[in-house]
Amino acid sequence: MKPWIVLLCLLLACGSLQANAGVWQPAGGRAQLQLWPGAVPDAQPMPGPETETLRTEHQIADRPWMAVTNVSRPTLTVYAPGGRNAGVAVVVFPGGGFQVLAIDLEGTEICDWLTSRGITCVLLKYRVPGTPYDWRRRTYPDDFALSVPSLQDAQRAIRLVRFHASQWHVDPHKIGVIGFSAGGFLVAETSTDFKRRTYKPVDAADKESDRPDFAMAIYPGHLALDDGRLNPNVPVIHETPPTFLVQAEDDYTDGVDQALVYYTTLAKARVPAELHLYAHGGHAFGLRHTRLPITGWPALAEAWMQTIGVLPH
């Protein structure tokens, strides 16, 4: 092998090791890190290899979306703002019913928006598919109280961001989460169940808090039971972080009651919360612009982040 090829391979290997060790410092770019340094906790067999499929059956703004499935090795992709850095980080949880991940519609496109506002975006590719979900009853099987693998990944992601906050030029007290549909349920889980450890610590990062400082749940799912009660797997407490919610009344996939019951419970616990309901919008619209007013929600989210002191006015 030619000497320059050997040198190039060594440099690439070093870069990969540095990124996975968390020493990469984002500066207007992006890098991908393995979420777990070794074995993935509670790993389950997958029905096949990880795949990406362009889905056209439910186009958003006349565009298809990319679905990722069979994720067994979760990753973090860190997107740094190219210009002004607000010192804020947001971890993104794409939706997909815990069966697939809408990795562009509710992932990379969200990061494009956040980084344009000076926010460091951390896209979590969490494990899917998860344990089967009973969509009609909106309950989990008796032997599976929580979507544990995805929650483990989400908690680990928040801890890693906080652990590397100084390297990534982020205020460790301005780390938020945003999620869509099933990812909105992960937002509620991480916002309410942060006192319960779901895996054994694997390194120094796991000494950090996994409580987000603020949360945004966009057309969240799985929060309301058929009898109108809040899913008991999201035990709202006063320490639940400030929360921003968006949903459409004609969301017939999960139902507008998802946001309503969560907001009501937050209000009773005196958690600062802001809810935006729209007559039309359906489900899974991301932030792709259409003629419907609901697609203007990002401007409301930015104003809310200013209101709670996360972004400057």
Image (cartoon, rainbow, N blue to C red):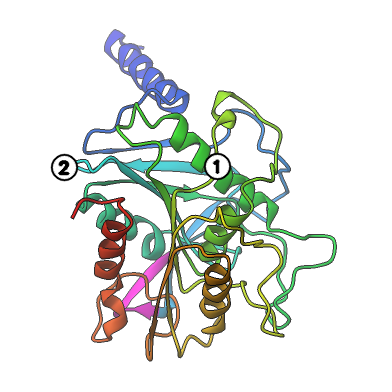
Q: Which residue is mark 1?
A: 210
Residue occupying the point 60% across, 56% down:
192
User: Which is the main secondary structure of the residues drawn in magenta?
Assistant: strand
Depth check: give the residue in front, 216 or 100.
216
Labelled disc at residue 84 = 2
| Residue type (three-letter) at the residue carrying disc 2 | Arg
| Residue type (three-letter) at the residue carrying disc 1 | Asp
Where is 215 relative to 153, above or below? below
Label 2 Cα crowd, 10 Å radius (few <14 / some 14-19 / many 20+) = few
Q: Image quarter for residue 137?
A: bottom right
Residue 62 is one of the magenta-drawn residues: yes
Depth check: give the residue in front, 285 or 257.
257
Indicate which disc, 2 or 1, sits on the residue closer to the N terminus. 2
SS under mark 1: loop
Magenta stretch bounds: 59-66
Where is 169 relative to 192, above or below? above
Furthest residue in direction top, as rendered: 3
Residue occupying the point 31% across, 65% down:
301
